[in-house]
Amino acid sequence: MSEKTTRTEMHGCIVCGKLHQLLVVYDTNGKLFDLKVMSADGKRVVHESRPLVACEHHNDEQVKTAVERVYGTEPEEE
């Protein structure tokens, strides 16, 4: 089993910028492995290579639009 590094990080909501605390796990190569949102009013935003978070009150469409605005569209899975 490979070693993983865990650390706490502050990240802004992808939609409005409000800060949330995350517990982020990286593999030995520094690639994102997993994360947990520690702030009560935050939710995880799925992204393959970056730890992202959004406020609970933002709907899925707002979050998707914000991710596309910042990171571009991701290729669709077949």
Image: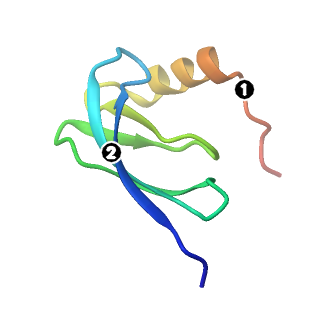
**Rendered location of residue 38, percent (x, y):** 23, 48
**Hey, what amino acid is under mark 1?**
Thr
Residue at disc 2, secondary structure: strand
Q: In the depicted view, which residue is nearer to us: 61 or 35?
A: 35
Label 1 vs label 2, nearer the camera: 2
Q: Residue at x 20, y 41 (%)?
A: 39
State left or right for residue 45 relative to residue 58.
right
Which residue is at a point 36% across and 25% down the rendered structure image?
Answer: 13
Q: Is residue 13 above or below residue 40?
A: above
Where is 53 relative to 25, above or below? above
Q: Label 2 is placed on what type of residue?
A: Leu
Q: x and y percent of residue 41 in the render?
A: 19, 36
Q: Badge 1: few (under 14), some or many (20 or more) residues near its Cα, within 10 Å?
A: few
Residue 67 image offset from top left, x and y in percent: 56, 24
Residue 55 placement: quadrant: top left
Which residue carries the number 1 mark? 73
Crowding around mark 2 (Cα neighbors within 10 Å: few <14, some 14 to 19, many 20+) is many
Q: Earlier in the sequence, mark 1 or mark 2?
A: 2
Helix, strand or loop at mark 1: loop
Label 1 to label 2: alpha-carbon separation:
24 Å
Q: Viewed as shown, does residue 63 lie left or right of 39?
A: right
- Circle on res. 45: none
Q: Which mark is residue 22?
A: 2
Q: Residue furthest bottom?
A: 1
Compared to residue 19, the image places residue 35 above or below, namely: below
